[in-house]
Image (cartoon, grey):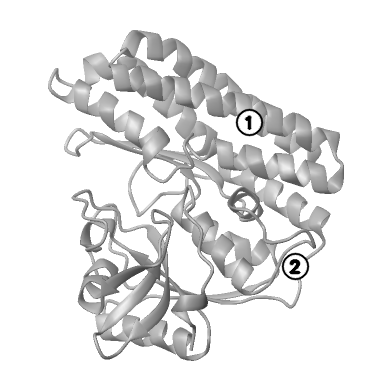
Amino acid sequence: MVSASSFLHRRAGHCGSGSLRNLLEFEGLDYGQGALGEEMVFGLAGGLGFFYAPDPSWAPPFYLVGRTDDLERDIADILDAELDVRESDDAGQGWDWASEQLAAGRPAMVRADIAELEYLRVKMSNTRHAILVVGHDPDTDTVWIADNDRDDLVACSRRSLAAARTSRGFPSPNRNATYVYRWPEQLPDIRLAVTRALSRAVSNMTGEVVSVGGLPGASGLAGVDAFVSSFERWPDEFPDALLPAAMSGLWVFIVKAGTGGAMFRSLHAGFLREAGELLDDPDLRTLADHYDRLSAAWIELADCAKCGAHEAGVTVARQVHDLEHAGVALMASIT
């Protein structure tokens, strides 16, 4: 049984990369310089992506995310792990999967709706939230959770966890999704892993449309194009009452919604910088500098959104567009 009292957890900028970082440290997997940081893990998962889906019936009237939907799956291929993703609408089956992992001495990574987790106390639904179940007290039916949004492990009733895991909220039902990893004894060669990760990121940004939660929208660089083009027309596309909500929502999606603070671009920049240092690779350092500039541009756009400065935001959004395209071209040139 996993011991919740001894499980090492650290607050993270994003739920998926934070949970995976915790799992890799639990397994003792690193590159000989101590536990991997969240930024390195995000990058090694090939996490960089983009998805934009507008819909005036939503609040805010669009959905925006800067990571791939398959981050938790892709890390297994990149790091030579085996992964069994289990899904069921049966809450009892979902709990059996989690408790099996605990009984085997491993944390269980699951997806949960933040609106149903009692310790978060939020109203907004997000069924794509990844957390670790690290312990269970059968006497009180309390589970212990490692959540990127908290500094320490948190207690949660099993009733609340079950509701969060069976939610049919936004953007799609999470179906008690449980990620069962079988990690290798050691990580693959660092250069091979970084090359695989960069190739995955390029594919995320240039490949076919990949939806998030089954939503209709645009992904990758085509998604960037669609977002910037749409943003320029927001005053015409959205009625007066919707524009302030859209601008406020944009700020949240860029800096607050578990994005690492800059639409996931700062996480990718950190990965590139650490990989460049480990491999003494100047090309990776140059890439890191570029994604630092892209991160700053996204933050500037968020600042415009927070202030309701749409016209100024249009100029920044066009800069974001050009930096996004240039970043993918730079990655492709060294893979």
Residue at image location 27% in from the left, 76% down from the top:
89
Q: Position of residue 211 (x, y in %)?
A: 41, 49
**Residue 190 placement: quadrant:** bottom right
Tags 1 and 2 touching, CB below 8 Å: no
Which residue, given by chain and number where applicable, does mark 1 sit on? 291
Residue 244 numbered tag: none
Q: Position of residue 287 (x, y in %)?
A: 72, 32
**Residue 255 placement: quadrant:** top left
For marks 1 and 2, the one nearer the N-term is: 2
Residue at image location 52% in from the left, 22% down from the top:
297
Question: Is residue 173 placed above or below 143 in the rendered structure?
Answer: above
Mark 2, secondary structure of its residue: loop
Q: Residues within 10 Å of mark 1 (few under 14, many from 20)?
A: many
Q: Report whether 99 appears left or right of 30.
A: left
Q: Report whether 264 appears left or right of 138.
A: right
Residue at image location 85% in from the left, 47% down from the top:
279
Whether residue 204 is visible? yes
Q: CA distance from mark 1 to mark 2?
A: 26 Å
The quarter of the rendered structure image containing the C terminus is: top right
Comparing 167 with 274, the one in front is 274
Whether residue 70 is visible? no
- What amino acid type is highlighted by mark number 1? Tyr
Question: Is residue 177 placed above or below 210 in the rendered structure?
Answer: below
- What amino acid type is highlighted by mark number 2? Leu
**Residue 81 placement: quadrant:** bottom right
Q: Position of residue 180 (x, y in %)?
A: 51, 77
Question: Is residue 96 placed above or below 122 in the rendered structure?
Answer: below
Which residue, given by chain and number where applicable, does mark 2 sit on? 187
Q: Report whether 59 appears left or right of 39.
A: left
Q: Report whether 196 appears left or right of 53.
A: right
Looking at this rendering, what residue extends furthest in the left direction? 241
Residue at image location 62% in from the left, 67% down from the top:
24
